[in-house]
Amino acid sequence: MRTSICELLDIDVPIFAFTHCRDVVVEVSKSGGFGVLGAVGFTPERLEEELNWIDRNIGDYKYGIDFLIPASRIEEDDTEKLKAMIPDEHQAFIKALLAENDVPELPPDYVGHLASAEDGATIGDRPIEMLRTTLEKHKKISFYANALGTPPPEVMELCRSHNIRVAAMAGEAKHAAKHKAAGCDIVIAVGGEAAGHTGDISTLVLTPQVVKEVSPMPVLAAGGIGSGAQIAAAIALGAQGVWTGSLWLPTQQSELTPIQRSKVIASTSKDTVRSRCMSGKPNRMIKSGFTAAWDADDAPEPLPFPLQYLLTSDAAERFAHFSIDEMVSYPAGQVIGMLNDELSVRQVVQSLMEDYIDAVERVAATLEL
Ligand SMILES: Cc1cc2nc3c(=O)[nH]c(=O)nc-3n(C[C@H](O)[C@H](O)[C@H](O)COP(=O)(O)O)c2cc1C
């Protein structure tokens, strides 16, 4: 399963894993693929701890980092000023959801796996500053992915100065053209079935359009990849590899709370929804009482990024921490309908490779008939 992207990043198989979990990063890179840590939910101090841990445990393998630096957002760097922009109606709506479900406050010494929107890598220039510190200190990072738009020139320059390969996400071919013009090395074509921020064009339709737009630049197909046959399909569509996220959620190493994990394992492909209720931008996540409440006729319209995220991140953490089953959600893609076992990361990579070989043999056999 080698493609040109394997040379570019010195990896054995073109399987990229996006995750908020350091163990998954290490295990995927050590299995021959490429682990990428999503930094959005970490404070600067916590990110430093996670990266030090990865550096100590990953051996001579390399890994990547992903920051959410949106092309469009409210241009305000002061968290207090941003919070003051949240209308009373929205504050009251969240308060009522917490009260209806009897959700207590988080304890004062509480530290969740992911930081709140206020403390994480979301506001103003904080993500760029965190990226700068990260690239200066962590030399096993060889790749940067920019979520939610073309990386700003400052980020491109920073990555170039550290010899880092840069990727950006595209939900439409025209996004891919912008990433190419900005000098990115790789485009990730993210289909509408994907977890997290996504457009509404399916991977099967989007990938060949993005490939055509930026060829010979390498493209990774993302959204709905859960088996080796789907990797084979991505390669057949012209992609040089795959970018996966949901696949790692039910693994033994992932960051999920027990309730989030059991929801992922029990969900069908109809149990996710694309909603602006978490961050203000369309984000695919597990359906819950929380997503339904924002869908109701009397709900306020979600706010633009990052206001909605500032409004909701504490509530989401409280629902998860206090196991309010009905209200718990998490970003997840339609592929979770295929993910019903709690395997180790290594077992997942192994089974992807075996299934890929079977799929390629099935396709090759069509030429012999
Ligand atoms: C829990 C979770 C959180 C995510 N957060 C981010 C993020 O911060 N930045 C990003 O670029 N993509 C994020 N994504 C999306 C992934 O990068 C990827 O595009 C997506 O998971 C691919 O589709 P799939 O889930 O069907 O594999 C997230 C995905 C998951 C599952």
Image (tube, rainbow, N blue to C red):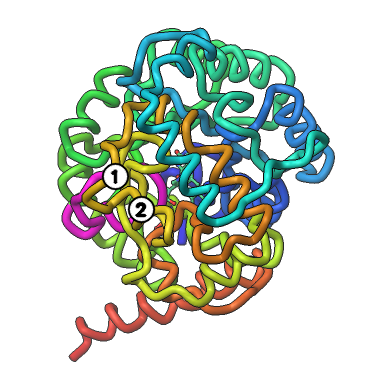
Residue 105: image quadrant is top right
Report whether 193 appears left or right of 108: left
**Residue depicted at 67% across the width and 56% down the height:** 322
Residue 299 disc label: 1
Residue 74: image quadrant is top left
Instruction: Kindly identify the amino acid type of the residue bearing the numbered disc 2.
Output: Ala
**Residue depicted at 47% across the width and 9% down the height:** 81
Q: Which comes sooner in the sequence, label 1 or label 2?
A: 2
Q: Main secondary structure of the magenta part?
A: loop
How many other residues sit within 10 Å of disc 1, few (<14), some (14-19) or many (≥20)?
few
**Residue depicted at 28% across the width and 52% down the height:** 295
In the rendered image, residue 255, in percent from the top left (x then y), is placed at 67, 54
Q: Secondary structure at mark 2?
A: helix
Task: Determine whether 277 is above or below 245 in the image.
Answer: above
- Marks 1 and 2: CB-CB under 8 Å? yes
In the rendered image, residue 38, in percent from the top left (x then y), is placed at 56, 38
Report whether 5 appears left or right of 201: right
Pick the front one: 203 or 14: 203
Instruction: Tell me how far mark 1 sits from mark 2, CA to CA.
Output: 7 Å
Residue 7 shows in this picture: yes
Instruction: Kindly identify the amino acid type of the residue bearing the numbered disc 1.
Output: Ala
Task: Determine whether 22 is above or below 305 in the image.
Answer: below
Query: Which stretch appears magenta?
Result: 192-205
Dividing the image into 4 quarters, which one contains the C terminus?
bottom left
Q: Secondary structure at mark 1?
A: loop
Residue 219: image quadrant is top left
Per the image, the residue denoted by label 2 is 293
